[in-house]
């Protein structure tokens, strides 16, 4: 259960005045999502990264984990818990996990995220439980090559306050955060015997699934 809390101050965050002012303009999850959508994808061309929010603002690009952390920080700066959640693909299918930042309005859950695809990003706060929220990603989560649906489970939320504030401006990769999220208890969405009934995406859905916002060849990425 979420409890009222104080906003994270600029002094405690360690952010510069410029970065703090930028994030304070992201006063709603919708505004945060707009900011993440406009941020180029981090293709990790020079190796895997887990950038802190400050590094994301310096690099001006992000992948899903980095975007979720920035969104969680924006929530904390506005007096809300900085929660992230992992959505995990079936092991061995060659698909990636996805990380979202969680928020609540009127007792219902929503999510903010950084993604290159049109269907697994923002979620309005209409979901009664995190399971409902996770299930909202199921139908459109498939392999573009085969249409096979692969979303398997979701994690318990990870409250970034457990890491203090050093993660906000950390100069090195936040691999400890990624590890902690992976180690959270995960809940399966599909009964084991029901996978055989799950229909693959059809040609029209496959065509829609190939839409992307950022191309790897874009010089900005």
Image (cartoon, rainbow, N blue to C red):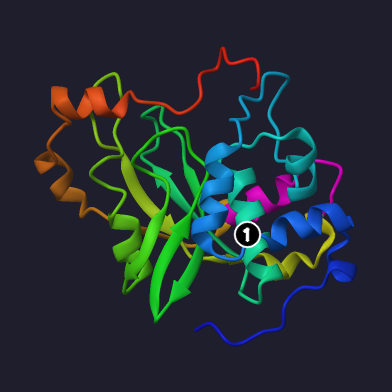
In the image, 94 versus 142, the foreground residue is 142
Q: Is residue 85 above or below residue 1?
A: above
Q: Is residue 128 above or below residue 60?
A: below
Q: Residue drawn 40% across and 37% down?
A: 91
Q: Residue furthest left?
A: 197
Q: Position of residue 161 (x, y in %)?
A: 71, 70
Q: Quadrant of residue 31?
A: bottom right
Give the position of the C terminus as an image quadrant. top right
Q: Quadrant of residue 158?
A: bottom right
Q: Residue drawn 46% across and 34% down?
A: 96
Was residue 50 drawn as part of the magenta stretch in this picture? no
Q: Residue drawn 53% across and 82% down?
A: 2
Q: Position of residue 200 (x, y in %)?
A: 16, 32
Q: Position of residue 218 (x, y in %)?
A: 58, 16
Q: Residue furthest top?
A: 217
Q: Which residue is mark 1?
A: 26
What SS does tag 1 mark? Answer: loop
Q: Which residues fall within the magenta stretch?
A: 169-181
Q: Position of residue 206 (x, y in %)?
A: 23, 25
Q: Is residue 107 above or below residue 26?
A: below
**Is any part of residue 101 visible from this angle?**
no
Was residue 176 drawn as part of the magenta stretch in this picture? yes
């Amino acid at each position: 259960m979420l409890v009222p809390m104080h906003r994270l101050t600029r002094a405690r965050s360690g952010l510069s005045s410029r970065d703090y002012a930028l994030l304070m303009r992201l006063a709603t999850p919708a505004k945060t999502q707009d900011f993440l959508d406009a941020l180029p994808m981090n293709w990790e061309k020079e190796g895997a990264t887990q950038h802190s929010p400050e590094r994301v603002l310096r690099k001006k690009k992000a992948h899903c984990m980095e975007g979720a952390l920035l969104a969680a920080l924006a929530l904390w700066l506005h007096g809300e818990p900085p929660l992230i959640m992992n959505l995990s693909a079936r092991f061995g299918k060659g698909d990636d996990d996805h990380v979202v930042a969680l928020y609540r309005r009127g007792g219902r859950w929503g999510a903010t995220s950084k993604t290159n695809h049109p269907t697994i990003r923002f979620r309005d706060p209409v979901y009664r439980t995190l399971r409902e929220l996770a299930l909202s990603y199921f139908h459109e989560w498939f392999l573009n090559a085969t249409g096979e649906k692969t979303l398997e489970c979701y994690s318990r939320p990870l409250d970034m306050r457990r890491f203090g504030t050093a993660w906000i401006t950390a100069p090195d990769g936040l691999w400890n955060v990624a590890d902690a999220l992976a180690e959270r208890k995960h809940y399966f969405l599909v009964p084991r015997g029901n996978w055989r009934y799950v229909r693959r995406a059809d040609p029209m859905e496959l065509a829609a699934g190939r839409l992307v916002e950022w191309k790897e060849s874009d010089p900005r990425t």
